[in-house]
Image (spheres, rainbow, N blue to C red):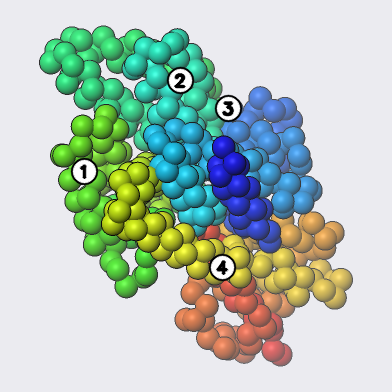
Amino acid sequence: MLAISAIALVGLTLRVLGARGNLWQDEIWSISLLGPLTSIDQIFWRINHDNNHFLNSIYQYVVGPAAAPLIQRGLSITLGTCTVIAAAVISRGRWAMVASGLLFAVSYPMVHYGSEARGYAGLVLFTLVAVALLERRLDKQGSYGIALAAAILLGFLSHLTMVETVVVLTAWTAWLSWQRSRSLAAVNGELVQVFLPAFLAVLPLAVAIVAGARLFGFNVGGFSPFSLETFAVGYGGMIRYFFGLPDWISGWICIAAVGVLVLAYAGVSRDRRASLYAIGIVGLPALMAVAHLPNLEFPRYFLVSGALLLLWAGDMIGRGFEAGGTRRLCAAGALVLVAGSSMTLLARFYEHGRGSYSDIVDEMTRSGAAATYATNAEFRTGMVVDYFAARTNRKASLVTQDKICAERADWLILEGDLQKQPERVAFDCALAYERAGTSVFWGLSGLGWTLYSRRD
């Protein structure tokens, strides 16, 4: 279909534009984890870090750490563009295909994660593919068990939060089976038949992870405790980003509005997917909140629910177009409004990107002599500085905070909100620094850096 091809081309272009600029901390972290490895198989059992997204790590291992940023993000660009096509293909009806494809093509989170050298683009793609294959498996249109298992395995290889997709698909299958049979035995039997191949496919990966964790431990990059406020920031923020809603609409209002609309649709619709949307968009986030999972202030942990939300929105807009009359006008208005708002967000993202850390490192090391610097975020800042200094064959040495007065670092990098950083930083040991530059970012990824030079 010509329209879908054109939409996919738009999606590809937006993702290539989003892939410009510096890699940011988590992308660099993923690449740095590969440094000590001596063979590609060690990706599965030697790293054991939650920032190891297997497919992305394999790709980075192949292209190498010296590749250009656009190449390093090439796998995500490809998978992200395929996601646009997949969203269109699995939608029902011509208008729903166009609407879903366009929403996935221009939605800021989809463009952002579809142009970042991590595993989230694959997570979304294989979630959509798994939904389509499960439907065909349930309809017994052919032998789709192996294909479903492959999609789920590829999802886990993309990102371990594919477990969210499995939870949703398992609950959906159980619900549909219960509606047909009203028998727990029949439900359990169908679940085994549908998901046993996927379990067997993922089992070797799980064994490798567990064995590696027993040998080398397992590290998590960051941990923040659960609270209802962080949940609202994470899920509500994701909803705002998906539809380009203004910041003054609170996270709770976004969550409540989406929940009411999706549940109301599920209550009146006879469409089989209505229960999928209710489970994935409302049930999964509620379960995550009840389980008090950590780190829920990060919108990326709601990408599975977000992908299903976009698919639902595309379905609703498509139905409006098919209905004609006033409903078609409302659907067209909604699609134009969401697309326009998304492009506004993308313009801000393209302006600032994920940060300009190489400019800061270049400023520090321009003289050619080995620069020294201190920072309030030693691990993160040190990793990023080392990465960009190595790409230009320069050297910058970290001075720890307890030695800053003794060694009088040439530079100071403060991580945090740029608006809250002072113009001048002074220490009790007659050491002072003045602002010399900033690294600005916007959106879902990045670090705010303020650079200060020493004033003797």
Q: Are marks 2 and 4 in contact (CB under 8 Å)?
A: no
Q: Residues within 10 Å of mark 1 (few under 14, many from 20)?
A: some
Which residue is at 49% across, 34% downward? 89
The quarter of the displayed image where residue 175 is located: top left
Return the residue found at the far right. 368
Nearer to us of marks 2 and 1 is 1
Instruction: Provide the residue designation for mark 3.
Output: 45
Instruction: Provide the residue designation for mark 1.
Output: 265
**Residue 341 in the image, given as x and y percentages of width and height:** 45, 65
Residue 351 in the image: above or below residue 150: below
Which residue is at 72% across, 66% downward? 358
Q: Secondary structure at mark 4?
A: helix
Q: Residues within 10 Å of mark 2 (few under 14, many from 20)?
A: many
Q: CA distance from mark 1 to mark 3?
A: 44 Å
Q: CA distance from mark 2 to mark 1?
A: 27 Å
Amino acid type, callout 1: Tyr
Amino acid type, callout 3: Trp
Residue 299 in the image: above or below residue 35: below
Question: Which label was assigned to residue 347?
Answer: 4
Q: CA distance from mark 4 to mark 3?
A: 40 Å
User: Quick check: can you spot residue 255?
Assistant: no
Instruction: Provide the residue designation for mark 2.
Output: 148
Q: CA distance from mark 4 to mark 1?
A: 33 Å
**Residue 162 in the image, given as x and y percentages of width and height:** 43, 34
Label 2 vs 4, first from the N-terminus: 2
Q: Secondary structure at mark 1?
A: helix
Amino acid type, callout 2: Leu
Q: Are marks 1 and 3 in contact (CB under 8 Å)?
A: no
